Image: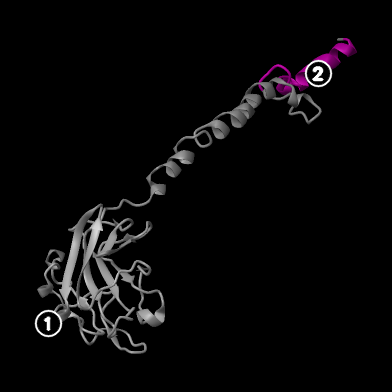
Amino acid sequence: MRWWLRVIVAGAIACTGCATGSGGVEDAGRGQDASTLDGAVADAGRDGGRDASVDAMVIDSGPRDSGMPIDSGTDAGAMDSGPATCPPTATNLAIVELMIRTETGTEDRGEWIELLNAGDCLIDLGGLEISSPPATYTIPAGHLLEPGERFVLAQSTVAAENRGLVYDLSYTGSNIVLDNNGDTLALIAGGTTIDSITWSSAIVPEKYSFEFPDTRPIAQNASLGNWCQASISNIYSNTAGGPYYGTPGAPNGACP
């Protein structure tokens, strides 16, 4: 055999496993950057297809980035719209404690009112009217009351006037005054009176709140015979002129 033919045959045998670089599936001899790796079938075929799939298909333009539930569901659904609430009604909201007089005279600014959520759902108090004719105060939006929770409204925001009361909201500026000589206080929701309590001067103790016991259903709070003076053991403030007795924001005990 001629020498040049032996060279061709030997070269063909030596490269039997790597001759698919420009027309087969694999790269051309696993070439480097300057070889056929970037322009051979492997890149344009299987490798190129995989690159195009990663860059332009499911990962970049599929459900996660194109508006499917992961990106748009939680933000647009109920999670951002807040918890479900109930409106105040005669069966779930009631006046349960009143501080009508902390001192004698017309300069008394220590009055307060306690409401109770006696229902089983979150009550939105926004828009609820507190009325002591002819004055009315409307609770602003953003005040929610959990089941079993109490809400204390103070006449004054000044600690020296409200006797250091811990309260949730003040109706100062509304001209609501709980008259020592007798008055009516009402809760009005959507134009409907859902609760009211009327008292006379005979049942207004000084420095003691008047409270409706937790042991009774709230449907009975309209009758003053079911209310009683706060216990002497329940001091909520011992500031100047005190002590003052009641359970603002806390459970009401049973009447004697």
Give the residue number, with chain letter if any, for mark 1: 256
Query: Relative to 35, is 180 on the left or the right?
Result: left
Q: Is residue 119 left or right of residue 224?
A: right
**Distance between mark 2 and mark 1 Cα atoms:** 116 Å
The residue depicted at 74 percent of the width and 26 percent of the height is 38
Quarter of the C terminus within the rendering: bottom left
Q: What segment carries the magenta color?
A: 2-25
Judging from the image, the colouring scheme is one colour
Tell me residue 141's x, y (percent): 37, 56
Looking at the image, is 204 positioned above or below residue 30? below
Q: Quadrant of residue 148?
A: bottom left
| Residue 22 location (% of width, % of height) | 73, 18
The amino acid marked with disc number 1 is Pro
- Number of marks in picture: 2
Dot 1 lies on which element? Answer: loop
Residue 226 painted magenta: no
Q: Main secondary structure of the magenta part?
A: helix
x and y, in percent, of residue 3 in the image: 89, 13
Q: Which residue does the image show at 36% across and 89% down from the upper left?
A: 240
Is disc 2 in contact with disc 1, using a CB cutoff of under 8 Å? no
Along the line of sight, which residue is nearer the eye, 182 or 219? 182
Q: Which residue is mark 2?
A: 10
Q: Viewer-nearest of labels 2 and 1?
A: 1
Secondary-structure class at tag 2: helix
**Residue under the point 47% across and 39% down:** 72
The residue located at (22%, 78%) in the rendering is 180
The disc, 2 or 1, on the residue closer to the chain's N-terminal end is 2
Residue type, mark 2 in image: Ala
Relative side of 52 to 126, left or right: right
Q: Residues within 10 Å of mark 2 (few under 14, many from 20)?
A: few
Question: Is residue 23 rendered magenta in the image?
Answer: yes
